[in-house]
Image (tube, rainbow, N blue to C red):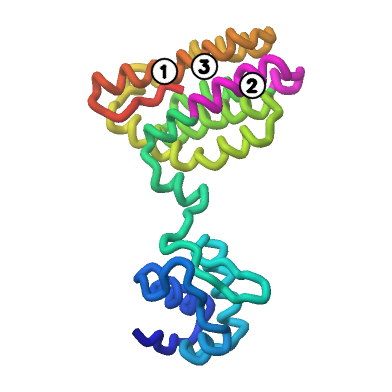
Amino acid sequence: MPLGAVRPSPLVEQAAARLREQITGGHWPVGTKLPGETTLAKELGVGRSTVREALRALAGAGLVRPRQGAGVFVLATEPVEDWPTRLRRAAVTDVYEVRMAVEVHAARLAARRRTDDDIAALRAALETRRAAASADDAVFVDADIAFHATVIAAARNPVLADLFTEFTPVLRDGLIELLSLTGLRGHDPNTGDEAHEELVRTVADGDEEGAAEVLRGELEDPFALAGKSEQPFCPGG
């Protein structure tokens, strides 16, 4: 199957897409050596520099691998998704389970490592969350997530913080949707306030296991509520 010349700009993206089609379509099986840059450039109707950049993009997707002095070889027929892409496709319940694992441990570390500034930041975040109780679901969820991000910041582990940041967009959308579907805040606009206050207290007291248990209980309760409402889960944290 001939490659066919690509249209003008963006040439690199178009060239990469055309080459990807050949790989995923089985024209170049795994282990196959791709034609040289000059040949590919001629078939695609682009310059060698464009082909080079397109191949770099395919290498970044895990489809090809250059071997010095030997050429470029097909490594896989399906691209390897990066972490943000996988998270965007993930079920909210899966993300929520990861959230529990990350945050429960973060609460334990926060109680161990918190400073006076961290405690002050937690108390301020709690008050912001309380103030958001009179606002709509999106504002309330943002305040709630900001509170939990403050707990994670007190854990002083940048990897935990990065993980939380990565899955926050998916979590945020799911929480807003679930609040809307269940109407939970119609009965309690500041749902989960007592647990959040207890979490601040245990972290401030340096009670590692207490903080972990409070957060675990807070994040586990929504699953019971979800069963009653026939939803994947219902936000309570």
Determine which residue is flagged by label 1. Answer: 220
**Label 2 amino acid?**
Leu
Q: Residue 223: percent from the left, percent from the top? A: 34, 21
For the residue labelled by badge 3, is the local secondary structure a helix, a strand or a loop? helix
* Marks 1,2: beta carbons within 8 A: no
Q: Nearer the viewer, residue 138 or 166?
A: 166
- Indicate whether residue 105 is drawn in magenta: yes
* Marks 3,1: beta carbons within 8 A: no
Query: Mark 2 sits on what residue?
Result: 122
Of the image marks 3 and 1, the number of the one nearer the N terminus: 3
SS at mark 2 in the image: helix
Q: Nearer the viewer, mark 2 or mark 3?
A: 3
- Could you tell me how many numbered marks the image carries? 3
Per the image, is 208 magenta?
Answer: no
What segment is highlighted magenta in the picture?
99-120
- Image quarter where the N terminus lies is bottom left
45 w.r.t. 164: above or below: below
The kind of secondary structure the magenta stretch mainly shows is helix
Residue 216's x, y, as percent? 49, 16
**Cα separation between marks 2 and 3:** 14 Å
